[in-house]
């Protein structure tokens, strides 16, 4: 039986609350996908201190830099390939996700997640405002089950982002939608 993956954002939660949510979900590995694994306002989540706090609860820590957010513009990908994302941060990350570096990071994450229950962490508490949603899309497209940890004892099943199109080579593109239903475009949501 395959283990599910989880996503979580640390936000300004206390470390006790954060670790409580991880232990409630039986997490054994926290995969940090922040580009820079530190926080000025919440230093308890710095790479130099967080692993020590997690170890006391038998939770391993790994910074997976290849999956980090805040990516620059990719000149090798046409703007329309991921035109669904009107928010630049999401658009740039979706472009980056088409690279070998991202694929290697994702393969590593999946390998780790098959050995132990894994949570993918970034700073933003709200999953749909974070690049974790694109990482979750890739996991789902690879046949993995993903849950977002929303709060204490609150999980939400992850679903493929509307507009995501899995390709035969394992990549995902997000082409611009041809019509609008009047619903807010998830591609316009701000990146936290």
Image: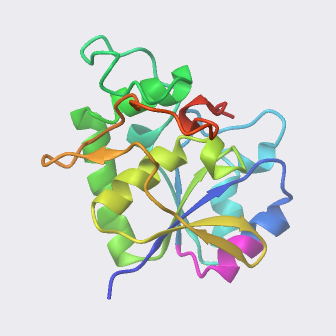
Judged from this view, the residue extending furthest toward the bottom is 1
- Given residues 60 and 153, the one toward you in this image is 153
Q: Is 153 placed left or right of 149 in the picture?
A: right
Q: In which image quadrant can residue 108 be found?
A: bottom left
Q: Relative to 31, is 139 on the left or the right?
A: left
Q: Nearer the viewer, residue 51 or 138?
A: 138
Residue 183: % across, % down: 62, 41
Position of residue 98 in the picture relative to residue 60 (left or right): left
148 in magenta: no
Residue stretch rendered in magenta on the structure: 20-28
**Closest to the observer: 147 or 13?**
147
Residue at the spot 47% in from the left edge and 76% down from the top edge = 117
Q: In the figure, 1 relative to 114: above or below?
A: below
Vertically, is 98 above or below 20?
above
Q: Residue at x 35, y 76 (%)?
A: 115
Q: Is residue 12 visible?
A: yes
Measuring 45% from the left and 26% from the top, which residue is drawn there? 91
Residue 159 left/right relative to 153: left
Q: Quadrant of the N terminus?
A: bottom left
Quadrant hosting residue 160: bottom left
């Amino acid at each position: 039986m395959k283990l599910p993956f989880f996503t979580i954002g640390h936000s300004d939660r206390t470390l006790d609350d954060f670790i409580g949510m991880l232990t409630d979900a039986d997490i054994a590995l926290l995969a940090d996908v922040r580009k820079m694994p530190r926080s000025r306002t919440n230093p308890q989540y710095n790479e130099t201190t967080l692993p020590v706090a997690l170890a006391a609860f038998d939770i391993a820590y790994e910074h997976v830099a290849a999956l980090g957010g805040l990516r620059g513009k990719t000149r090798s990908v046409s703007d329309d390939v991921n035109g669904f994302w009107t928010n630049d941060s999401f658009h740039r990350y979706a472009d980056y996700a088409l690279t070998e570096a991202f694929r290697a990071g994702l393969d590593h994450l999946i390998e780790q997640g098959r050995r132990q229950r894994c949570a993918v962490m970034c700073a933003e508490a709200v999953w749909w405002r974070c690049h974790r949603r694109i990482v979750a899309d890739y996991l789902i497209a690879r046949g993995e089950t993903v849950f977002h940890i929303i709060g204490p004892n609150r999980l939400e099943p992850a679903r493929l982002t509307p507009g995501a199109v899995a390709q035969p080579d394992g990549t995902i593109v997000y082409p611009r939608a041809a019509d609008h239903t009047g619903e807010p475009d998830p591609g316009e949501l701000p990146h936290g």
